[in-house]
Image (cartoon, rainbow, N blue to C red):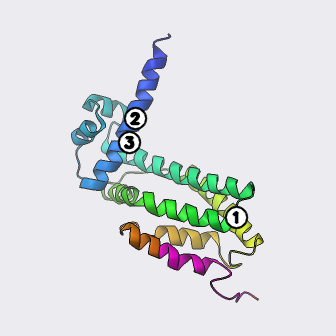
Amino acid sequence: MTSARPLRADAVRNRKKILNAAREQIAAHGPDIGMDEIATAAGVAVGTLYRHFPAKTDLVAAVIADWLERVADDAEAAAARTTAGSRALDEIAAFLQHFLQTAANDMAVKAAARTIGADTDPDTPVQRVTTALNTLIHAGQAEGDIHPDVTLADFYLLLDNAPTNQTPEATARWLTLLLPGLTTQGRPDTTA
């Protein structure tokens, strides 16, 4: 019975290695990358990979679910810092910047998922992101920094259209141009 704990830790470690390798390999080589290549990149045997993910669609769906969980964690951390007294606009800017920095590889995996028909159930992490972004938006509006007409739908529009396939310089420029459109300082209030 005591030997099960180290195996479980190994299984968790192997799963994480497989997910990281799959994300990197799919981003670098596209959806046609083989399971053998992913296993090699993860440093695990092919059988280990298949024990965790019986089909490639299962693996890609898990990579996307992992990405959504990380986005949700980031959004919740930003909302928690805002609730603890941090300025909402600063947290929104940091969240968007982090999203841009990490999204390029993950967007490639998302595209691969569409190509191979991997099915994901994003409801739980998306709901977490929705709750956290609403907290940030409302806090920013209460502080007078976020324009009163900015909505959650606006944020999802921004995230869906973020220039994740651009250079870091281009994504930084996008953020510089975007933020004034969200703020009360960037444009006049036309809701009155």
In the image, taking residue 188 as reference, residue 93 lies left or right, namely: left
Q: Earlier in the sequence, mark 3 or mark 1?
A: 3
**Magenta-span inclusion, residue 189:** yes
- The amino acid sitting under disc 1 is Arg
Determine the residue positioned at 22% across, 41% down. 37
Does residue 57 appear in the picture of this structure? Answer: no
The alpha-carbon separation of the residues under discs 1 and 2 comes to 37 Å
Residue positioned 39% across, 57% down in the render: 110
Question: What type is the residue that disc 3 sits on?
Answer: Leu
- Would you call the spot at circle 1 few (<14 residues within 10 Å), some (14-19), or many (20 or more)? some
Instruction: Give me the disc on residue 15.
Output: 2
Relative to 128, 45 lies left or right? left
Q: CA distance from mark 3 to mark 1?
A: 34 Å
Q: Quadrant of residue 138?
A: bottom right
Q: Is residue 124 magenta?
A: no
Which quarter of the picture shows residue 38?
top left
Quickly name the residue at label 1. Answer: 87
Q: Residue at x 52, y 72 (%)?
A: 158
Q: In this figure, which residue is indicated by the disc labeled 3?
A: 19
Given residues 46 and 168, the one toward you in this image is 168
Please state the horizontal and vertical placement of residue 33, each as a whole percent of the image.
23, 49
Magenta range is: 174-191
Q: Please provide percent x and percent y for residue 13.
A: 42, 31
